[in-house]
Amino acid sequence: MRMAAAFLAAFVVTALAGKALIPFLRRMKAGQSIKEIGPTWHMSKQGTPTMGGLMFILGAAVAVAVLGWPDFLAGRFGGGFVFLFALVFGAIGYIDDYMKVKHHQNTGLTAPQKFLLQLAAAILFTVLMREHGYLTPDLYIPFANVTLPIPWPVYMVFAAFVMVGTVNAVNITDGIDGLAAGVTMPVMLFFTAVAALWDRGELGVFSAALLGGLAAFLLYNFHPAKVFMGDTGSLFLGGAVCGLAFGLDIPLVLILVGVIYIAETLSDIIQVAYFKATHGKRIFRMAPLHHHLEMGGWSEVKLVCVFTMITLAACLLAFFGVLDRWT
């Protein structure tokens, strides 16, 4: 019941926040700058308000604070830790968005600056979760239902790599109207179902709240988008996805539930590597993958629907893969 209430509370708060936030962002001239190297038809989106991720961050914060309070009183801080972890990434994204808006260009923090901030957040989160008993250095293998013991220093390196990689993969996926939000909704549904199954309500409240927040955000972000989530939202989502995977001690499940994030990232890496190796040739019409398909005639609505359904199917498979983790 608390998870359902968290979903509804976050949905309502996010929907109401959007009514006030979007006009405010317009008044502040917080418009998105569109890259000239991107699809030409995206130039019509120039000036659409960005940093809209603030609305579902607020929705999730209210739901976690109110409905997660019994857990905090009982000393169960997992949901709060994951929310704060995601919030740190959202803050990094906000700084990046603010710099882009201030300088009226599509570049904010440098890549090294982002990487170091994200790495520090990942390390601190990993240590915190281990100290409170949410993490073990035993890597669970889905479907096989076995754990692989790993030395703690090695696990730390693994965790930091996966967290930073996941956050940036979600960020890359946020390239067309509704895509990052649409794809992440089945992932949050998966984590909510797993948390309910294993009686981990402190984590399930957060995942359910974010699910509700994203559903409300799509009221404004579905094509044609009235607002973009910006790096504020996409980095927060990335932090939430990997934070929940590690919080539930099933990080390898990200390979399945994050299948679209991975495909988008790999298409970008392959394109750049092939371009450099062949001195100018390309494998994809444009990277990442959603732009390649756009240039092949796919509409934004079709892309969101297909990618979301693929993620939903992958999440269903992942659910059966981890079913026996704690049962």
Image (cartoon, helix red, strand yellow):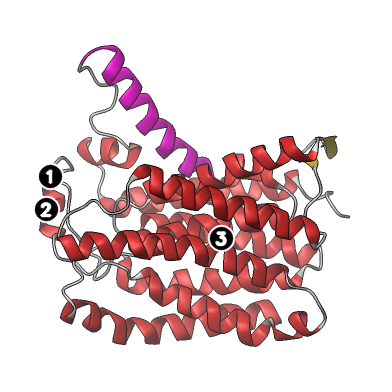
Is tag 2's residue or tag 3's residue first in the polypeptide sequence?
A: 2
Residue hosting label 1 = 36
Q: Which mark is residue 240?
A: 3
- Looking at the image, residue 67 lies above or below residue 232: below
Can you name the residue that lies furthest to the top here?
Answer: 278
Per the model, the C-alpha gap separating discs 3 and 1 is 31 Å
Tell me the amino acid under the disc marked 3: Ala
Is tag 3's residue or tag 1's residue first in the polypeptide sequence?
A: 1
- Specify the segment rendered in magenta: 258-279
Q: Are marks 3 and 1 in contact (CB under 8 Å)?
A: no
Q: Are marks 2 and 1 in contact (CB under 8 Å)?
A: yes
- Looking at the image, residue 44 lies above or below residue 220: above
Tell me the amino acid under the disc marked 2: Met
Seen in the image, is 7 located left or right of residue 299?
Answer: right
In terms of secondary structure, what is the magenta stretch mainly? helix
Q: Are marks 2 and 3 in contact (CB under 8 Å)?
A: no
Tell me the amino acid under the disc marked 1: Glu
Per the model, the C-alpha gap separating discs 2 and 1 is 8 Å
Q: Which mark is residue 43?
A: 2
Report the residue at 40% width, 39% height from top: 264
Image spot of residue 154 (x, y percent) = 72, 35
Image spot of residue 290 (x, y percent) = 32, 42
Q: Is the residue marked by circle 1 packed among few (<14), some (14-19), or many (20+) residues within 10 Å?
A: few
Report the residue at 29% width, 53% height from top: 176
